[in-house]
Every structure is written in C-alpha cells, then in structure tokens.
Amino acid sequence: MSFPRYPKYKDSGVEWLGEVPEHWDILPLRRSIEFLTDYEANGSFADTKENVAIDTGEPYAWYVRATDLEQRRFGLVEGNRFCDQATFNWLTKTSLRGGELLVAKRGEIGKVYVMPIHGGNATLAPNLYLIRLKRNLQPRYAWYWFSVDPGKAELVLADKSTTIGALYKDDVKACFVTTPSTAEQTRIVEFLDAETGKIDELVAEQKRLMELLKEKRQAVISHAVTKGLNPRAPMKPSGIEWLGDVPAHWNVLAARRIIQRIEQGWSPECFGRPAEGEEWGVLKSGCVNRGVFVEEENKALPETLDPIPEYEIHSGDVLMSRASGSPELVGSTAFITETRARLMLSDKIFRIQPEPNIDRKFFVAAFNSYLLRSQIERAISGAEGLANNLPQSALKSFLFPVPPIGEQQAIIKDISTRCGELGTLAAEAQKAIDLLQERRTALISAAVTGQIDVRKLAAA
C-alpha cells in the first residue's frame, strides 16, 4: 500500500535527515525538555542502593526498571522491586507520575520507554534518565522518533564512551527531533498505533506458528524414540506408568547401562568474549541450549593459564548442559557435527560417551524428548533462578528406551527428514517475521520524518 506525501518540503538543515515537510520544525531535544534527571542526581548510588534494594519497610512505591517495562509488569506486582515510603519521599526528584520519557543511559544504551499511567507510586531505578517534556513534544511521538533511525541513531552516536558504555545528559539534550504541531503529532501517533498494531498481530501469528512447529518437532522426536516407526509393531508394557507401552523387542534400561563414560571440564576465570584465532576457549553452558551446539558460546582463556588438552572437544562428541540459571536448559543435549579447534569443556558441561550399541544421535534425540525431559526436571536440584544442577548420579538413574542399533539409525534418519520439513516451515515463518519487522521500522521512520502525510489518513 502506498501513502500520500506532503505537498511541499524544505531542506531540514540536518545532513542525515534530508528534506522534511515545509511547516515542520527540527529542534534539539533540549528545546522540548521541561526536566531531565536520573537516580544518581538524588545522591550517590552507593548511598541509595541499600535503601532501595533491601525491603526495610512496607511496599509503598514501585522501583521502575527497564525489565519491568519490557515485560509489562506494572506496579507493586510479583517480580518488581519496591521501596518503602521513607525512601520514596527521599527520592522525590525521580518520582514517576506516568507519561515521562525514560532513556537507558547504560546497558542497552539509548533505548527509550514511555512510563505508563499506573495509578500508584513509582520511582526511577539507576541506568535510566527521566525526561519530562514540554507541551510542544508528545511522549508517544518522541518514543516513535527515538525507536527507529534517524532518532535512534542519534542516541547511539551520542554514546561517546570508549570503555564502559554511557550516555550523558548533554548528549541526549543535543539530539534533534522533528517537531510538527501537537495536533499533527497526535495524528501521526494514531496512524502508527493502528498500522503497527496490525503488523504486530501478524508477527504474533507467525510466532504462534513457530511455537506450534516447535511443539510438533518435539512430538515427532518423542514419539519416534519411545514408540518406534512401525505403528503395527507388537507392544509390551514398559513397567513404567508414565512411559506406557514400548515395542516388544525394545529394552528399557537405566542410563548407567548405556553410558560408557561421563566427563566434566574446568571453569577458570576467563575473558568475557569468545576465543579468537588460535586462542583457547572454555565452553559456556549455553553452548548446547535446546539441543543445538553453538561454538561461539565460549569465553577466551587468558594466556596466563595453560589449557588442558584432554578437555578439548571434537566432532562426534555428545555434550549435555549440567548446570544453568534457567531450569529448562539444564540437560539440553547436542551432537557436535563440526567445531573449531581449541575449545574445552567447562565444569558446567558433561561430555558423554555412550556404549557402542547406542547411536550417539539417537542418544541426543532421546535426551531431548519429553520422556527424558520429565525425568531431568524432577532431578534438578536448586531453587528456580539459581544455579540449577543435574548430578551424575541422577543422570545415570534415568530410564532409557533402547531399540536395536539398526532401528536407532532408521529412527534418526526419519526424524531428520520430518524435522527438516518442519525446520523449513519455521525458517519461512521467521523470514515473514523479519520482513514484517522491517516494514514496521520503515513505516515509523517514514511517518516521523514526514515522508507520509498522515493528516487525512489518521482522521479517516
């Protein structure tokens, strides 16, 4: 769909912006700011952290972090932090009424939020700037401007730090903003809310499709490794209530009877970046998330530490996540098809060598099935959100359906074919999401730079 343009344009005077509608203003953000502050403006972070981070009184005010806004957790709800009334009264400069612009000054630098109207008390967390705008610039319009280029690019370029990323107040104030009349800003926001809402619904549909495909893939694997490929094969009771019947010629064995060896690696203090060139790296637990090996999930070993060559991983290895902050990732198992040299096991990763009568790819598929996942979840020790751990003793006790080796290989071939088809559909869905998100970004950019005349469109 094509949209109309404004009848007349002028040079904006800003090289990277180009032409804008003739009647629009282009102003530095400072011309539209009534008040800009941050948490540290009320005192040093060291002084205030203890008061806010520790619950010393009755919950009184929501302590607003970027993660709360991203996850739409508004107010004094589970997962949010809070402060008591005395602390809130002390942090008066950063109290939030709703409608303020919040800008990340560290972390995801330059990300912008609009504070929702929440009907309670709230105060600002560190790492965010609070901006109250004058009437000539509406918060939702400013949010759209700074969510895409060129506004977003300005905030990114304002980060002049060469070490720890930081965004400074004067640099934020110096950013330019296209500023049509407030009535026109309202129409632009209405237009973008409607159009992006339609796009977001289509994206949500594609994401739901991807979830269904993921569930279908899991069901295909789980059925194949517990029931086999022949629907007419004679069955027998497995003796395990939650497993049900299995093919009559299969065995159900404890994992200790099919595992020849389990190794655990080493986790020294490493750099925070992946290994490069000829450097050695130590694998992170995330290297096998959801059954896929990702070699980039490693940390470079400092030159001052000697590697342990026997911990180096190789093509054909089976790796399993032993510990993770996310319970659903503990026990994730992957087969290494290929990998770069000089990557070592960490102590959060098992390297498992199955017995010769167990196909390694079948072993991985079985451990990523519903059958083994349910056993893993019951065995995990540690509270949610902490370092969840899978002990070797628990791993060895898991029950494992074992068909003959030839049937294992046939099952893997079938899974590969069927999951490959599902993977193609998932890739198409992801491509559709990418295209929709590109269109969303282009639409917002065109509207806030005046490349679309939305006055009649928004009013329709």
Image: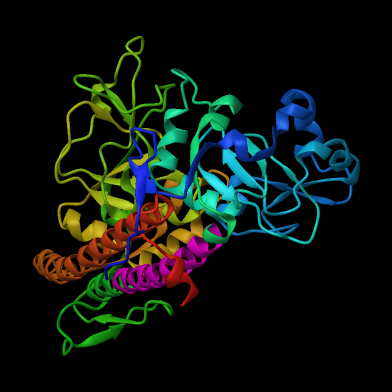
Image quarter hosting the N terminus: bottom left
Magenta stretch holds residue 194: yes
Residue 452 visible somewhere in the drawing: yes
Closest to the observer: 94 or 15?
15
Against 396, residue 205 (above or below) is: below
Against 47, residue 153 (above or below) is: below
Residue shown at 73% from the left, 57% from the top: 75
Outermost bottom residue: 232
Q: Is residue 104 left or right of residue 429?
A: right
Residue shown at 48% from the left, 36% from the top: 176
Residue 382 visible somewhere in the drawing: no
Residue 24 place in picture, x, y as percent = 47, 48
Against 394, residue 408 (above or below) is: below
Residue 187 place in picture, x, y as percent = 51, 64
Outermost top residue: 304
Against 69, residue 16 (above or below) is: above
Over which residues does the magenta segment extend?
185-214
Q: Is residue 419 left or right of residue 240?
A: left
Magenta stretch holds residue 443: no
Residue 180 place in picture, x, y as percent = 51, 51
Residue 141 place in picture, x, y as percent = 53, 54
Q: Main secondary structure of the magenta part?
A: helix
Q: Is residue 214 left or right of residue 249?
A: right
Q: Quadrant of residue 369?
A: bottom left
Residue shown at 33% from the left, 55% from the top: 442
Closest to the observer: 377 or 419?
419
**Colour mapping used in the image:** rainbow
Q: Is residue 63 left or right of residue 140?
A: right
Q: Quadrant of residue 305?
A: top left
Closest to the observer: 450 or 207?
450
How many numbered discs sit on the rendered protein? 0
